[in-house]
C-alpha cells in the first residue's frame, strides 16, 4: 500500500480498487506482473497512469529511502513468514528447487541485503521495457471500451 504505484493509481487518482505488483520465479522462467482491479470505464486511464509510473521509474530510478523501506518491509515479511509452517516449508521448497540446496533464513536475508539500487534499475530496464510488456484484460467490458489496439498505442507511445 505504500508503493509509488499504489499511491498514484489508487490513492491519488482513484482509478483502481486493487493495485498489486508481484513476481513468480522458477529455475528457467518467471513472470513479473502488475495487477489492477478497475472499472471497465476507467481501464484505459488506469493502464496509462500505470505506464506513466513505470516510465518515471525507468527515467529516475528509486527515490531516496525507497530501497531501504522496501527491504525493511520484505525482511519483516520473510521473518514473520517463519511463524507459519506452510510459508516456511514453501520457502525451503522454492530454494531447494531453484538452487539445489537448503538455505537458512539468515543466508537468504544476507543475499537480500546485497541487492542495490543499481541492481534493481538494471533488471527494471529489461523487464519493464514497454516493448516487452503484454496486457490481459478480463471482465464485463465491451470490446469497444477496452480495445486491444488502444492499449497497443498506450504501450508504444504513452498516449491513448
Image: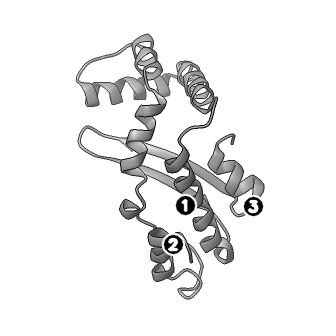
- Label 1–label 3 contact, CB within 8 A: no
User: Residue 145, how many percent across, how many down?
Assistant: 59, 84
- Answer few, some or many: residues within 10 Å of disc 1's Cα (few below 14, many 20 plus, some between 14 and 19): some
Residue 38 in sight in this render: yes
Q: Which residue is mark 3?
A: 13
> Of helix, strand and loop, which one carries label 2?
helix
Give the CA distance from mark 1 to mark 3: 14 Å
Left/right of residue 72 with respect to residue 149 in the rendered view:
right
- Answer few, some or many: residues within 10 Å of disc 3's Cα (few below 14, many 20 plus, some between 14 and 19): few
Q: Which residue is mark 1?
A: 51
- Answer few, some or many: residues within 10 Å of disc 2's Cα (few below 14, many 20 plus, some between 14 and 19): some
Give the residue at x 55% y 18%. 79
Numbered circle sitting on residue 154: 2
- Label 1–label 2 contact, CB within 8 A: yes
Give the residue at x 64% y 71%. 45
User: Residue 48, how many percent across, how many down?
Assistant: 59, 67
Give the CA distance from mark 1 to mark 2: 8 Å
Give the residue at x 64% y 42%. 3
Q: Quadrant of residue 81?
A: top right
User: Residue 157, how many percent across, how many down?
Assistant: 48, 72
Give the CA distance from mark 3 to mark 2: 18 Å
Numbered circle sitting on residue 37: none
Amino acid at each position: 500500500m505504500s508503493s509509488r504505484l499504489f499511491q498514484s493509481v489508487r490513492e491519488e487518482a482513484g482509478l483502481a480498487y486493487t493495485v498489486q505488483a508481484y513476481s513468480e520465479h522458477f529455475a528457467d522462467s518467471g513472470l513479473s506482473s502488475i495487477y489492477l482491479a478497475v472499472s471497465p470505464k476507467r481501464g484505459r486511464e488506469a493502464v496509462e497512469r500505470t505506464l506513466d509510473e513505470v516510465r518515471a521509474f525507468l527515467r529516475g530510478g528509486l527515490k531516496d529511502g525507497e530501497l531501504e523501506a522496501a527491504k525493511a518491509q520484505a525482511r519483516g515479511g520473510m521473518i514473520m513468514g517463519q511463524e507459519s509452517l506452510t510459508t516456511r516449508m514453501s520457502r525451503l521448497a522454492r530454494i531447494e528447487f531453484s538452487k539445489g540446496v537448503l538455505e537458512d533464513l539468515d543466508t537468504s536475508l544476507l543475499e537480500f541485503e546485497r541487492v542495490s539500487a543499481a541492481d534493481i534499475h538494471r533488471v527494471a530496464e529489461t523487464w519493464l521495457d514497454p516493448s516487452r510488456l503484454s496486457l490481459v484484460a478480463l471482465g464485463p467490458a465491451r470490446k469497444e471500451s477496452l480495445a486491444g489496439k488502444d492499449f497497443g498505442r498506450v504501450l508504444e507511445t504513452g498516449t491513448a
